[in-house]
Image (cartoon, rainbow, N blue to C red):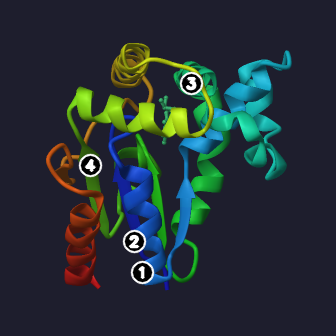
Amino acid sequence: MSFCVAIDGPAAAGKGTVSRAVAEIFGFGYLDTGLLYRATGAKTFEGLSPIEAAQSLTAEDLQRDDLRSGDAGQAASRVAAIAEVRDALVDFQRAFARRNGGAVLDGRDIGTVICPDAEVKLYITASDEVRAKRRFDELIEAGEKTTLDKVLDDLRERDTRDAARATAPLKPAEDAIIIDTSDMTIDAAVAQVVELIKART
Ligand code: C5P
């Protein structure tokens, strides 16, 4: 049986951490859809066009070491605005969403485009400053040299582009439950999501 948990929201709001924890608790598969766009963006560094990059994406491309960098995030958000790139990635995501045994997908358009009939739809957000601090800590931990101001500017630029694009813009689905994690620990957010899922299973 399939059961889809769709988790959308802006960059560094805690979606990934919540999704991984929830998938583990319920034994669901987890797909970080941002990785598909990051890997597509990273392939353009080698001279492929964004559309060619998306159409030729392999599981190996998703294992690259540089996908978490700020540059890969910016490249992801640029290629993600191209309708043909998004089209090339839809079937894989929809099949994952309806896999047997349940699935958690996080991204920007899961509840609106990829899985509009998801059993649980969430929109996880947090203030710009809280998100920038979380992403800054992650990047420093990963060895990248950056500043909090640069990370904040980067996030805002990416969110503005993601929300303004014509195809599958970042926005909560009409029936999504909005969770603001600004003043919440990730553990508290996970606990809240677990209760929501239990109520629908
Ligand atoms: O979630 P993450 O920060 O890894 O996503 C990188 C970029 O990929 C986002 O800024 C967004 O432009 C794009 N993306 C998207 N749709 C998704 C997931 C990510 O457009 N479902």
Q: Amino acid at mark 4?
A: Tyr
Residue denoted by label 2: 22
Q: Is mark 2 within 8 Å of ligand 1?
A: no
Callout 3: 10 Å neighbours few (<14), some, many (20+)? some
Residue denoted by label 3: 70
Which circle marks residue 93 in the picture? none
Which residue is painted at 44% across and 37% down in the image?
Answer: 137
In the image, residue 28 sits, relative to residue 144, either above or below, namely: below
Report, in whole angstroms, how far the alpha carbon at label 4 lies from the one at label 1: 20 Å
Residue 39, image quadrant: top right
Image spot of residue 115 (x, y percent):
42, 56
- Front one among 68 and 124: 68
Which circle marks residue 25 in the picture? 1
- Front one among 84 and 11: 11
Q: Amino acid at mark 1?
A: Ile
Which residue is painted at 62% across and 33% down in the image?
Answer: 143
Q: Amino acid at mark 2?
A: Val
